[in-house]
Image: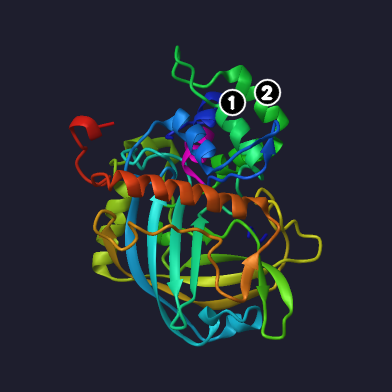
């Protein structure tokens, strides 16, 4: 089939896992709810009401590590897109690894998705920005469901946990969230950023040089040997395990991924990130991503970048998936806020003290 914390199994644990995941995962805005327009600031307010406020950090995927490298292609991707990124050559990339969650000081030992963001630049001045997760599907398909989940999962003051009855009602109304919970509970949780496959989640329109347009999802498949964390003992991991492992790994040599472009079949759902594509699909190996160096976020080139996945080169455009333009609004709002606040202290390493301690 082509698919494109710390909680143990159980209802309360699943609630906690999804809250942590969505509070720091893809966030978006757009759409009408109850006659009121929901904008990026509104969605961020919902996120902060659940996970707290951390000035100077991204509102989602707050804990991160910058990297630099290259993308090299032999031109095979040009069969699907006229984007200059698929012309034979080697192009610089700036990227970022992160884990889901709005708390930059949270431990890595949580069953939440790991993410990779990329900015790929070509000599003609075009940019391709991406925000990818190691899960092939996303829990909800629209902003209304995201906002409803945030409200259903808001911790009660008395217990510090969501109301189980409210969450149960929400899950009954949103079976796609329950399906994602089941997937996450069973899926392997990579033990390194370097050996995870990262998925575009959403579908995009690729237009080839003959003006033929196809819907495509893509994935970066690792060349590193696979490996998974022991979820039963995940809370025993050092707080910064994934980040320290990637720093040490990179000191020994580069990490690489193969870019695969997966073309939608007739009948595939292309406007909902909650739905996986099953069965055989036309897949093109379009190039190799090589990570050559990592940098702390407070000094790295990724720090001041907004990895808005709607910033695309000619030859790639948005699909009808409502998450895409909506995510852009929240990414922009988050970027503006942290730029005004100034950078926070390093989220990797010894715990901060004083007013920045969490």
Can residue 222 be seen in this snapshot? yes
Q: Would residue 237 appear left or right of 286 to someone viewing this image?
A: left
Pointer 1 local density, CA inside 10 Å: few below 14, some 14–19, many at least 20: many
Q: Quadrant of the N terminus?
A: bottom right
Which residue is painted at 45% across and 54% down in the image? 115
Q: Nearer the viewer, residue 274 or 130?
A: 130
* x and y percentages locating residue 204 in the rendered image: 64, 64
Q: Which mark is residue 322?
A: none
Task: Name the mark nearer the viewer: 2 or 1.
Answer: 1
Q: Are marks 2 and 1 in contact (CB under 8 Å)?
A: yes
Q: Secondary structure at mark 1?
A: helix
Which residue is painted at 48% across and 34% down in the image? 45
* x and y percentages locating residue 261 in the rendered image: 61, 71
Pointer 2 local density, CA inside 10 Å: few below 14, some 14–19, many at least 20: few
Residue identified by numbered label 2: 169
Outermost residue toward the top in this view: 158
Snapshot quadrant of residue 300: bottom left
Q: Nearer the viewer, residue 85 or 335?
A: 335
Can residue 61 be seen in this snapshot? no
Sequence order check: which comes first, mark 2 or mark 1? 1
User: What range is drawn magenta here?
Assistant: 17-25
Residue identified by numbered label 1: 152
Which residue is painted at 65% across and 61% down in the image? 203
């Amino acid at each position: 089939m082509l698919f494109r914390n710390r909680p143990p199994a159980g209802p309360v644990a699943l609630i906690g896992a999804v809250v942590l995941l969505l509070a720091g995962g893809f966030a978006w805005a757009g759409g009408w709810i109850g006659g009121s327009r929901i904008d990026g600031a509104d969605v961020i307010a919902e996120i902060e009401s659940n996970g707290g406020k951390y000035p100077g950090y991204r509102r989602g995927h707050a804990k991160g590590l910058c990297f630099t490298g290259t993308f090299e292609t032999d031109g095979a991707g040009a069969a699907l897109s006229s984007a200059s990124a698929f012309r034979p050559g080697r192009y610089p990339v700036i990227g970022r690894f992160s884990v889901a969650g709005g708390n930059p000081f949270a431990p890595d030992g949580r069953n939440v998705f790991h993410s990779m963001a990329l900015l790929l630049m070509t000599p003609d001045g075009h940019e391709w920005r991406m925000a990818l997760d190691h899960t092939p599907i996303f829990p909800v398909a629209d902003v209304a469901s995201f906002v409803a989940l945030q409200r259903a999962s808001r911790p009660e003051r008395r217990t510090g946990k969501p109301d189980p009855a409210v969450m149960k009602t929400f899950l009954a109304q949103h079976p796609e969230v329950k399906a994602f919970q089941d997937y996450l509970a069973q899926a392997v949780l990579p033990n390194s950023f370097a050996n995870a496959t990262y998925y575009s989640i959403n579908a995009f329109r690729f237009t080839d040089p003959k003006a033929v347009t196809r819907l495509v999802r893509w994935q970066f498949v690792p060349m590193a040997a696979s490996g998974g964390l022991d979820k039963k003992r995940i809370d025993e991991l050092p707080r910064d395990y994934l980040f320290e492992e990637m720093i040490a790994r990179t000191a020994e040599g580069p990490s690489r991924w193969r870019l695969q472009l997966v073309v939608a079949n007739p009948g595939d759902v292309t406007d909902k990130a909650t739905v996986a594509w099953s069965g055989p699909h036309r897949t093109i190996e379009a190039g190799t991503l090589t990570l050559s160096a990592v940098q702390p976020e407070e000094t790295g080139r990724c720090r001041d970048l907004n990895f808005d996945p709607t910033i695309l080169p000619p030859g790639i455009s948005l699909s009808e998936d409502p998450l895409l333009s909506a995510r852009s609004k929240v990414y922009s709002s988050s970027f503006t806020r942290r730029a005004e606040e100034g950078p926070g202290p390093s989220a990797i390493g010894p715990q901060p003290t004083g007013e920045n301690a969490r």
